Every structure is written in structure tokens, then in C-alpha cells.
Amino acid sequence: MLNNLWLLKKLLNNSNRIKLNRILYFFFLFILSSCVKNTIVEGEEACIDESKIDEMAICYLIYEPVCGCNGMTYSNDCIAESNGVINYEMGECLD
């Protein structure tokens, strides 16, 4: 038993402990970074980012319609973005 403790103490000298601590540090960083909440949501919720909704936005009044990923036509890209629309295509929505 004493031989095993001596061997363990010898293996874990200061330089090895530092290396082990670094390995454990990066391992825990990897584990924490992989625990990011999955933010992909299907349907209309993935189309609208509520944090980007700005009811006080000042947009230009040029009519260049865009079709939002939620199927709504907006009069221009500024209005679409101020309504939180993440993806849109140029032109009016069909249907």
C-alpha cells in the first residue's frame, strides 16, 4: 500500500499536477461550451427574433416590398427588420 502511495506521489509531482490541472481546465471549458442552449426553433418562431423588434425604429418610406420568412409582406427591409424578421426575400409574398 505504501509503495502505491509513493508511486502516485512521484507521478504527480508539481509539473505533472500543473499539466493535469491544465488538461482538466480545458476539459471543463469544452464541456461548458458544449452546453449551449439549442436556439433553433421550427416554424415562425425561428423566423422572428423578438430581441430585434423595435417599435420606435425610424424607417424610410420607400416602397420596396419584401416577403418575410413568416409569409407576410413588408413595405421594405427596414420595416421587416424592425419587426424582428430574420430572413426575407425581395418582392411581395405570393398568396
Image: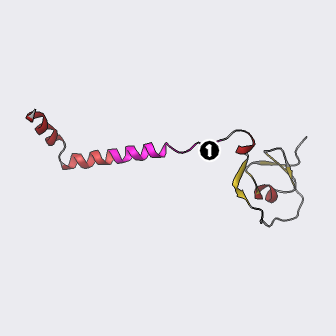
Query: Badge 1, how many Cα within 10 Å: few under 14, some, many 20+?
Result: few
Q: Is 39 a magenta residue?
A: yes
The color scheme shown is secondary structure
Residue 55 placement (x, y as % from top left): 78, 62
Task: Name which residue type carries label 1.
Answer: Thr
SS for tag 1? Answer: loop
Between 92 and 52, the residue placed more toward the observer is: 52
Residue designated by label 1:
39
Tell me the residue at 10%/32% (across/down): 1
Q: Where are the magenta residues, as a range?
A: 24-40
Tell me the residue at 42%/47% (across/down): 29
**In the picture, residue 31 is in which quadrant?**
top left
Give the residue furthest to the top.
1
Task: Tell me: 41 left or right of 30.
Answer: right
Residue 95 placement (x, y as % from top left): 91, 40
Task: Tell me: 43 left or right of 36.
Answer: right
Q: Is 71 a magenta residue?
A: no
User: Looking at the image, is 37 positioned above or below residue 76?
Assistant: above
Tell me the residue at 13%/34% (across/down): 4
Tell me the residue at 78%/48% (across/down): 88
